[in-house]
Amino acid sequence: MSELSRDIALRIGLAARSLPEVAPAQLLQALIEQLGLPLTEEKLQGLKVKDLKLAMEELTQVEPGLLQVALRQLKEGEGVNENLPAVQPPLSQGQFVRVACASNQGELLDGHFGSCVRFLIYQVTATEMRLVEIRSTLEVETAVLMDDRNEARAQLIGDCHLLYVVSIGGPPAAKVVKQGIHPVKVAAAGEARVILAELQNTLASSPPPWLAKLMGRSLVRICHNEEDEE
């Protein structure tokens, strides 16, 4: 097999993350069968959604939206990370819930746990919402087994209290819960801030016991951090 350039290998790794249950090696083989060797920049730029769909047919059924995301990643690589929302300074005191939102583009909550491109990390209170970090999931793709990647993704957001996703399977959800994170599946993808506004309303009224407990843990963590700085 011809040696892949680092850039093309990275693009394939990025694209594979958007395709549920598809490993980078599987996507590489599918592209080779569809486009032939060597895989070049010119061939990737000429790739269309229908070509990618055809290449995926023997592996899995992929929804059109995810195919579009994967195609952009194959053509643009890390360029897809442009137009990301601005990150705000984190809250240093008060009670807040730290929320990870699975995202593939912009400030949308539109990702599946096992394949999203990144996690948007918010601090949410009854009156305020801040996007404090954007965590790429690229590093977890170094794990060979699917279970390893799910474990790595759970650890990547291990300091969060809630995880908002479009979809998450049973075994991955168990790994998330093991990290002390409560997974929440949304009915439909949308703007992260609009969806999290419902959480704010809950915090402002009467949060259920499990959420109140998370808020208490958040306050304890802040106190510990302040003590560490002294």
Image: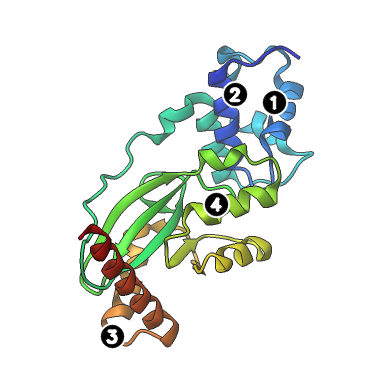
| Residue drawn at point x = 66 percent, y = 34 percent | 24
Q: Please say if 91 is above or below 12.
A: below
Q: Residues within 10 Å of mark 3 (few under 14, many from 20)?
A: few
Query: The disc labelled 1 sits on which kind of residue?
Result: Leu
Q: Are marks 2 and 4 in contact (CB under 8 Å)?
A: no
Answer with mark 2 or mark 3, whichever residue precedes in sequence. 2
Answer with mark 3 or mark 4, whichever residue precedes in sequence. 4
| Real-space Cα separation, disc 2 to disc 1, in angstroms | 12 Å
| Residue drawn at point x = 56 percent, y = 12 percent | 42
Query: The disc labelled 4 sits on which kind of residue?
Result: Arg
Query: The disc labelled 2 sits on which kind of residue?
Result: Ala
Per the image, the residue denoted by label 4 is 153
Quadrant occupied by the N terminus: top right
Which is more toward the observer, 163 or 41? 163
Q: Position of residue 139 (x, y in %)?
A: 53, 39
Answer with mark 1 or mark 4, whichever residue precedes in sequence. 1
* Residue 228 visible to an observer of this rendering: yes
Which residue occupies the extreme front position in the image?
230
Per the image, the residue denoted by label 1 is 31
Q: Are marks 2 and 3 in contact (CB under 8 Å)?
A: no
Asked whether, in this view, residue 196 is left or right of residue 52, the answer is left
